[in-house]
Amino acid sequence: MKSVIFLLFFASICFAQYDQSKIMDVVQGVEDGNMVLTVEPETELTKVLRAFDGNPYTEAIWAGTGRVTITLQLAKVVPISQMRIFWWNSGNFTLEIAETVEELDQGSGTYTRIADQQPCTFFQWDDLAFDTVLTGALRLDVVATGNQVIIGEWEITEQHTITSLRILPDPLLLLPETSLQMEVEKIDESGNVYSSDQSVDDMVWSSSDPAVASVTLGGLLRGHVVGDAVVTVTWGALSTSSPVEVLEDFRPELAEPAQIKVAVVYQNPIIPSAGGIRLHQKENWYNPRALVQQIIDVFAEASQGVVQFQVVETLEDDTLFTVMNGKFVTPEEVAAYLDEPNWQSLKDAHNAGTLYFDYNAMLDYYDFCAKREAGLIDEVWVYAWAYAGMYESQLTGDNAFWWNSPPLRGNSCHKLLSIMGLNYERGLPEGVHSFGHRMESAIRHVYGRWDLDAENPNAWEIFTFIDKDKPELAHVGNIHFPPNGLSDYDYGNRRFVKSYADNWLRYPYLFNIARSFNCEEWGCTQLGYLRWWYAHIPRYAGVTDGVLNNWWHYFYDYEGAVEKAANWTAVEQDGQKSAAFPGDYGLQQNYPNPFNNQTAIEFSLPSPQPVRLIVYDIRGRERSRLVDGIKSAGRHKIAVDASGWTSGIYFYRLETSTIQIARKLLLIK
């Protein structure tokens, strides 16, 4: 089993040094706020980043000028030993480096000139190798022979040394008569992590008690009887050990519970002609308020309390957002259409494409985008009548993607906002079903694929295996097809199949354990199957292959989940998380963020020392120097007044004599 769980367990490590090169990820560094690019003449940042995207044929172009200067500032110094530049123009270039921008500007201290007016040739690489040097700032000055500068790629190679190893997964847990493929990560002096090719790297494995758990030359760990052992891996002069537990059974640690703030809109108007009762009462349909609570309960139970929806705003008036034949419908019109045989007018308008729900009108009317930006709500649920023109689920925001429907555009939302379209003519099973397609969309998106015929299936693809497509290899299935299903919605199929579904209750420990069952496993009903399916969605702490072991997080906060997975450095224990920076230095995310004029930044220092806290705009120009002087040890909170700034992305950086930490903030007016 492939696993990349970032935990902080280190045992009996012998230190040595092995070279490890790494291409600097400038695009990611700039996006994360850990690097700042400055260009003269000024150029749109996205165009400049083409020179760092790993593809020499997606060029960065400066038309109408024969000279360009690019300065790259790093959040901390890194060892660099090589650079390569692919040119789309001829001319000459000068390349300079230093530990700080000040030294680079002044040509003093650690300043080094790697190339001085060195000729460059169209459509060729220039390779620059040199002794490893600590670098915090780089500057490339290009003079072209013509009136435009074109750079295909500027590749910067970091040169690190491997100093320790780590065995994954951690902890090592097995059941008797099961096996687990271990992997080894190499860790350099800066904390960068590299996967290891054990077939090439000549790893040597051993177990302290092979009767409990034995290990093969390739790192396959086998559990035999209940007990404890210690497994050790050695690579040259480096060695590390990890405890092994063989248990009768276990469940991984649950992820931290999340409270998701929901605004519920009831499109359930009063119908005067029916005696002043609500539409659901007139039609003798389900009470949408009761359905909302039932849905909340289903997800709390299925996720073992990890997902806790909370209704923070309830909106119920006679303002309707369904448009039919060019105008918003009224409550009495809806009632009349529903009185027609077969709801013919509604169906005709639907089939003609003249019936739809105006999402953006609703967002504006209730100011939902502003509430989302301010953190007052996390998502919106809308309960309406049959044929109200809604999708089951839709996503809006700057980075919105397919959410069982096309992304919604044309509004002021920046953060992702999920909007559920529910129908009180139908009951709890259908409502819970609609959320399932949202889950499918979220997990497919994070893995980037849902191809059941893929040669190397990802975890999501394996999760959705059904016997119909993968005989004898079924796992959990999808919203429409249970493991033994032969057709859509085949929740009552009594055919027995072999399934590996139980393994997902121990994710990411996917053992080779299977059993046979049929629909009686979930009661042979749609709601029973959906409860069973959701109960197998991973909800655990940790990260595997760059994806959180808590898939629910992508379901309720996709952007937050992506950020958490990228920044995962330790297991959170007792409410504390190990620092992602050296010592006790800390730079927190500004709050609120995004913000309108006023926000605050917190940082911490391990000892009294000179410190600077500076805000830069997206072009790397200093916007505000918040701190520049000696500060005491401990936490400091700095108020930021951005009333004179324009809306957009800014970066703030904490600088001392030993560290530089940067983060990104978003100003929205």
Image: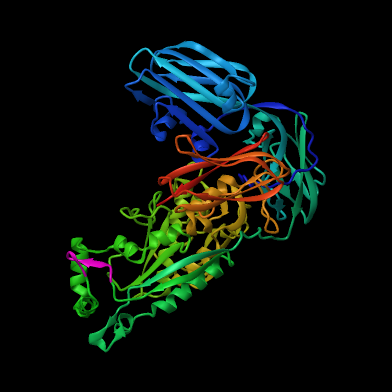
Near-viewer residue (360 or 41): 41
**Quarter-of-image position of residue 232:** top right
Q: Residue 56: x percent and y percent? A: 43, 24
Judge left or right: residue 603 versus residue 9: left
The figure's colour scheme reads rainbow
The answer to whether residue 136 of the structure is visible from this angle is: yes
Residue extending furthest toward the right: 208
Residue at coordinates 21% horizontally, 80% vertically from top-left? 339
Residue at coordinates 76% horizontally, 50% vertically from top-left? 244
Q: Residue 467: x percent and y percent? A: 48, 56
Judge left or right: residue 341 versus residue 665: left
Judge left or right: residue 549 versus residue 163: left
Q: Residue 555: x percent and y percent? A: 48, 58
Near-viewer residue (471 or 535): 535
The answer to whether residue 490 of the structure is visible from this angle is: no
Residue at coordinates 69% horizontally, 37% vertically from top-left? 218
Residue at coordinates 31% horizontally, 62% vertically from top-left? 359
Q: Residue 364: x percent and y percent? A: 32, 62
Residue extending furthest toward the bottom: 275
Near-viewer residue (643 or 95): 643
Please determine whether, in this image, residue 283 is positioned above or below residue 599. below
Query: Is residue 324 covered in magenta?
Result: yes
**Quarter-of-image position of residue 249:** bottom right
Please determine whether, in this image, residue 644 is positioned above or below residue 320. above
Boundaries of the magenta span: 320-328
